[in-house]
Image (tube, coloured by chain):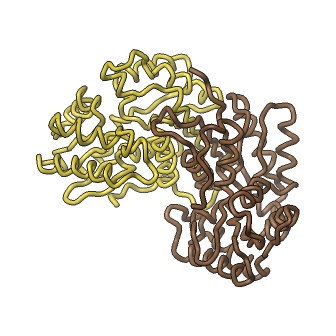
Chain colours: A brown, B yellow
Amino acid sequence: MVDLPIIGVLGGMGPYAGLDLVKKVFAETRGDSDQGHLPVALLSYSHRIADRTDYVLGRTAENPGHAIAEVAHDLASIGVRIAGIPCNSAHEPVIFGVITRSLADTDLRIPHLIDETVQHIRELLPSVQRIGCLSTLSVHRTGLYRDAVKAAGLTPIMCDDHVAEHVVHCAIYDHEWGIKAHSSPVTPRAQELVLEGIRHVRERGAEAVILGCTELPLAVSKAEGVVCVDPVRALARALIRETSPSKLKPLCRD
Amino acid sequence: MVDLPIIGVLGGMGPYAGLDLVKKVFAETRGDSDQGHLPVALLSYSHRIADRTDYVLGRTAENPGHAIAEVAHDLASIGVRIAGIPCNSAHEPVIFGVITRSLADTDLRIPHLIDETVQHIRELLPSVQRIGCLSTLSVHRTGLYRDAVKAAGLTPIMCDDHVAEHVVHCAIYDHEWGIKAHSSPVTPRAQELVLEGIRHVRERGAEAVILGCTELPLAVSKAEGVVCVDPVRALARALIRETSPSKLKPLCRD
């Protein structure tokens, strides 16, 4: 038996986003039996990893990159050579830099979720120019997606600050009815706020919208009049392409 | 920060059943934020693990217990002390014995899925006596559930051999439309056959029915006139109870 490279998943940010990435790896793989699927190792140690958004916004001093790097070392110790982090905020340079520096002495590589998402848009939607960006408040403020979209020659369409904070961010984080508190199923209130955020950027001219927090695709996968882009799917496809390209399903719009 | 014991999952049997167990661990945990969830390590190395049913039926010579034990050692090496196997057939004594003997020199324990399921029925449905047993053909023939149900003082209601082979087993294994080939979503044809199997044991007097292959709860969670019992949920609850009992949600019939 030829052994296959293992796809690592640094999960727990949040727990359901980690599961979602694994599910999308399976969904994007050609395989009609157990044995036809690719090997995946998911470490979902959410209790160890401080909130990424709180850190980027300066609300906590603990850089979650250190804990993420520790978990990545566990993956490396069981033979994993490539791993995805299904959390957009963890790709902020102040966090992602800590992780990649810590892994410099290992063989483990981490594809960059944001870059893979922008590349995915160019492949999937070559004629689309105006890209809406929904995210947590920290990613909104730092402009992580805005800058990556611009660097690719596309036009970012951002939420206004009020919508970013009181609509999209609340949909993700509210302790009573937010997606992190209720992911399976998502509450109707959270779902409605995500749709409101999508309508907002569509009205500002977006032709496609990046659901740029891994909780968002748990709430909404489609919306009227605009193509929803799921960074978790882009990352799943990148992980398959980098490990077992012949098993990657053809790209299709839904 | 107090570290928490990690819940291990020996997945890949099949891939979606492993995911389903992780999802049910999260669903049965009290937690309203990422940090409130329990740590989980899932190794889904389906390509290494030969089909359990084929081995029990004598169709292949390779005992999948050896490969499962190897993966379990990987879990042990990253600090996991308890792990579940979301595959009913892997708990046949000829397979499960190989795994537990191989782990004798480690701290890793594997709760027994079948025993946990029967215990779960007694807690959830204390007044129910007649228990239908649906499963793969190998578990049907060896009587794994039949004997465990009997040992608990309950009455097993089995499928006739034709239904076991041409209805329930086909729903799981058909390469075109079976649940292992199409798990997300399950095909209508596979779902209808699972419901046919449930009606069959209900007509034979079952008050509750064990969905005794981890693919079956992916197709059906409820049926008319009979309570469906999900071994994966029983295992998820056992894993939480054995690691972080204060985080276990109260038992409810939903």
- With respect to residue A129, does B47 lie above or below? above
Which quarter of the figure has residue A171?
Answer: bottom right
Residue pictured at 43% horizontal, 47% vertical:
B182
Residue pictured at 25% horizontal, 54% vertical:
B227
In-front residue for pair A188/B105: A188
Residue pictured at 18% horizontal, 37% vertical:
B153
In-front residue for pair B147/A5: A5
Any part of residue B127 in sight: no
Q: Give the percent coordinates (x, y) of residue A159.
A: 76, 78
Q: Give the percent coordinates (x, y) of residue B79.
A: 63, 31
Residue pictured at 75% horizontal, 60% vertical:
A122
Quadrant in which the C terminus of chain A is drawn: bottom right
Q: Residue furthest front?
A: A127
Any part of residue A58 in sight: yes
Give left or right: position of A95 versus B85.
Answer: right
Q: Residue furthest left?
A: B204
